[in-house]
Structure formats: structure tokens, C-alpha cells
Image: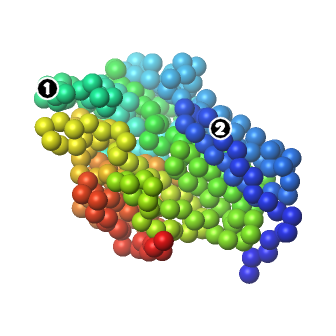
Amino acid sequence: MISICNAQEMFKQEMMVMGCRFDVTVVAGNQQKADSYIQLAVDEMKRIENLISSWDPNSQTSEVNRNAGIKAIKVDRELFDLIQRALQIARLTDGAFDISYASMDRIWKFDGTMNQKPSLEAIENSVSKVGYENIQLNTEESTVFLLESGMKIGFGAIGKGYAADKAKALLQSTGVEGGIINASGDMNAWGHQNDGQEWKIAITNPLDPSKSYGMLPLKKGAVVTSGNYENYVVLDGKRYSHIIDPRTGYPTSGILSVTMFAPSAELADAMATSVFVMGIEVGLDRINQLAPLDCIIVDDQGRVHYSDNIKINPQ
């Protein structure tokens, strides 16, 4: 039985962090408490941004990138552990997820200016510095060494999920009984709404964003949707996603959106991108082997594919 204090209300605030829109909703007794909770979350997410940012020259990530092929860099244990988990996911997905994607040349354009594919040579060269196998970690020294000159790491496919996880954990430890953090569509929830109801999320139809396939309860953990229905290019009648396979340099195709359910937003973020790259058949097979992960895939014909344990409540 769920006990809810009658005085509890839901409070929501929007902000820009890490170049993305974050919405933080908390269940609290009054506006003052809610504001203090939300400020805690914002401060924590900005702290993460300062740690992992590859565009801030003063960040540890930038220091690692500057010293690629030169020397190992000692980093905070938090950043070291994040990189270590990212490498575990890279191995798990056969390189479909790879934080060294940041080394990739941006030869594909998705702003309407591209009218032909890059040359084969340009595509092969674009990923010549990509390779998670060349990220060397020293656990005892907490150092990171990018073995090849010109290599870079980046957290674009995992960073906002990690920031949402850390903000959620901080709010839970502070005593916030229920809330949801929406990091530009990456949803991370805990507890219940102020009326005791479960948090629910709609699975959007990428062919018609005004409609959804149904509702799913988000009791705990996170759900992330990765899509190419707004950012893509059509060349020779074929639709290419802005999500690039870091192993080949080619954009992914055949999938419009992947919705991933996982215990953490960090993992959901990484695996949603990975399924895009792996494709429908391989992606579903991999997810079905990785409980408690689940996913929903919408292909470019509008067909919906589910992992084994998905149950949707139709609207």
C-alpha cells in the first residue's frame, strides 16, 4: 500500500544543461522545498558537465584528448569508472557503441546541404582513429591513455544519461520520495506521483509524433528514445540516420527509433544508440540476452518490433 502525504505536490522546472533541455519534476511539500531540490539536481548535472565535457578545454576529458599518443593522464575516479563502463558496453556490443567516436571526421551532413555520398576513401579515413581497443586504462593509477595520436573520446551518447542518474541519486539521498528527470527525452524516474499513481510514458509514433503506440508504466529506472525521424538525409532514394556506425563510418539505416528500458539512463542511452547501429535482428537478439533490458524498435516502414518482455497498454 502506498502512503502519500496529502500536502505533497508536484513541481517542475526546465533548464538547459550540457546543451540539452532538462526537465526536473519532484514531489515536495511546498515550492520552497521543491526549488531547493531542483537546484541540487541542476548543480549536480553542471558538475558532471564540467567533468566530462570535451568542448571545455579545462576539463579532464579535454586533457586526455590533448595527450592522445603522448602520455597517460590521471583523472578523477568518477571519470575513470565512467570510461571503464563505456568500454564494457563497447565490448558487449562489438563496438557498436564506442566513446572514441569523437575521433570521427564529420563528413556526413544532415542539414540539407549534402546531395551525394562521400567517397569510399573519405568514409574509411573518417574512422581511422576510432577504436575503443586503443583506450588504455590503468586501474591502480587511475589513468587514461589514448594510444594513437589524433584520437578523442566523447560522451555524447552516454553523458546526459549519466548526469540524470547522478541527479536522481542525489535527490533520492536527500529524501525526495518521487520524481522524474527528463533529459531531452531520456526519462529517469523513481517513486510515485503525488497522488500515488505510477509515472507513465507514451511511446511516440515516429511517423506521426502527435500519436503514440501506447502507455508504459515507469516504476523505476530509465527509458530513452533515440530517433532519426528528425535528423537524416536521403541519398539515391535511401534514408540515412545521423547516427553513424563507428566501425564503418556509414550512417545507420532501416530504423526510425529505438526506445530502451534499463535500470539506469546511462545504460539505456548507450544501448539505444547501439541497437540503432546493430540493426533490428542483431539488436533484439542482444537485448533479449541482457535482462533486465528491454526495447521497442520502429523500422523505416513503421513496423514495430519488441524485445521479449515488453507489454504495452494501448491508449
Residue at the image position 45 percent from the left and 18 percent from the top: 66
Q: Residue at x 44, y 23 (%)?
A: 65
Please provide percent x and percent y for residue 133.
32, 38
Snapshot quadrant of residue 173:
bottom right
In screen coordinates, is 289 left or right of 169? left
The residue that label 2 is drawn on is 15
Residue 119: numbered disc: 1
Q: Residue furthest bottom?
A: 1
Please, what secondary structure does the residue beneath circle 1 have?
loop
Circle 2 sits in a helix, a strand or a loop, which is it? strand
- Answer yes or no: do the residues labelled 2 and 1 have beta carbons within 8 Å? no
Asked if residue 33 is positioned above or below residue 143 in the image, the reply reads: below
Q: Is residue 85 visible?
A: yes
Q: Is residue 292 above or below residue 123?
A: below
Residue 76 visible in the current orientation: no
Task: Say whether disc 2 or disc 1 marks the residue closer to the N-terminus.
Answer: 2
Which of the two discs, 2 and 1, sits closer to the camera? 2
Gap in Å between the C-alphas at discs 2 and 1? 41 Å
Dot 2 amino acid type:
Met
